[in-house]
Amino acid sequence: MATTFRIQPAAPTFRWLGVNGTERNLPAQLPAPVRISGQTAAVRVNVSADAAYTVTGGQTVIMDIHAAQAYLQTHLQADAGEKIKLVQIFHGDAVCSRLTADLDDLAEVELVQIYLRGSDTVSDNAVNMDGRKSVFTSYIGYLQDGDSQLDINLNVVQRGKKSASATDVRGVLRERAQKVFRGTIDFQQGAAGASGAEREDVLLTDETVINKTVPVILCAEEDVAGTHGATVGQLDAREIFYLQSRGIPEAQIRELIAQTKLGGIIRHIGDAETERAVWKLLGREDADAAELES
């Protein structure tokens, strides 16, 4: 019997908006988690089938997720004073990903996620910041085209005193692509002095795309500072005209602008080999990629 993968937002809204959650069926038996810890160099993981991982102890992990119809479970356990960095590159089809993270006192977690196309990608990310002065930083980028669908949920719960979170999301939707991003910062009791910031910047290149952005801040503590926002825009006709006047074809202009949007996220990968691989997936060579980083 199959199990159910379910995303439920921290604060449901009107049902007719179609953002109150999603469900997918999973295999009845899921793999036992593989523990990643104690490595001095970055650990590279290829995900081509159902998989589960537990990351501990000041580790850097880079995941190349190219599976088809697979489930990925990842848990980050950042104990007191530890730093964990996780990079996830999604370029498979029908992938369900669930990420959980627990941060203790003075712990730091950096998350970089890049979603490239994919027929139906669902990603649920739950971060628990119980630790005092814990820090969570995330950089999320996506490029969706054709009939691809992407559903991302990020729920950051801050209970730790003076904890700090920051999320930067940048994406491009083309053709008939559909995307949902739910970003929640939840300040709970005990989070005095905490801060949280979240921003999404979306570029829509065609009128046939569907974008749903749901930024939410919940607050049960008085002494906190939270900000969120979203910018949704289309290609600037004046910019296209200017570049055309310089002899650049419109199709190439559209591609350059779309890829420039992702450059600011790609540079946070911090690993030259992986960055080159991502640019290659985007159809760019190294020399071109360097010019696009912003």
Image (cartoon, rainbow, N blue to C red):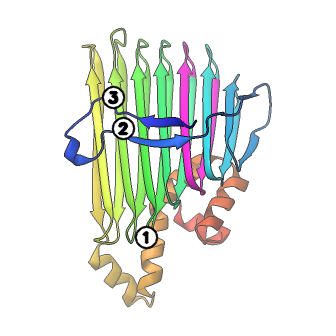
Q: Which residue is mark 3?
A: 10
- Inspect the magenta stretch and tell me whether residue 104 lies in it: yes
The image position of residue 157, as x and y in percent, is 40, 22
The image position of residue 132, as x and y in percent, is 48, 12
Q: Which residue is mark 2?
A: 183
Q: What type is the residue that disc 2 sits on?
A: Gly
User: Which of the labelled discs sits on residue 257, or is there none?
Assistant: 1
Residue for point 52% across, 54% down: 115
Q: Of 116 and 15, which appears nearest the observer? A: 15
Determine crowd level at label 2: few under 14, some 14-19, many 20+ residues with C-alpha closer than 10 A: many
Q: How far, Cα to Cα, is label 1 from label 3?
A: 34 Å
User: Which of the labelled discs sits on residue 213, or is there none?
Assistant: none
- The image quadrant that residue 176 belongs to is bottom left
Q: Of 205 and 211, which appears nearest the observer? A: 211
Determine crowd level at label 3: few under 14, some 14-19, many 20+ residues with C-alpha closer than 10 A: many
**Mark 3 secondary-structure assignment:** loop
Q: Of 245 and 92, which appears nearest the observer? A: 92
- Residue 255 visible here: yes
**Mark 2 secondary-structure assignment:** strand
- Residue 294 visible here: no
Q: How far, Cα to Cα, is label 3 from label 2?
A: 9 Å
Q: What type is the residue that disc 1 sits on?
A: Ile
Q: Which segment did they paint magenta?
A: 83-107
Mark 1 or mark 2, whichever is nearer to me? 2
Q: Of 213 and 256, which appears nearest the observer? A: 213
Residue 89 vs residue 37: left or right?
Answer: left
Residue for point 22% across, 41% down: 15
Q: How many marks?
A: 3
Residue, far front: 1
* Residue 240 higher or lower than 118, as above or below: below
The image position of residue 151, as x and y in percent, is 42, 48
Determine crowd level at label 1: few under 14, some 14-19, many 20+ residues with C-alpha closer than 10 A: some
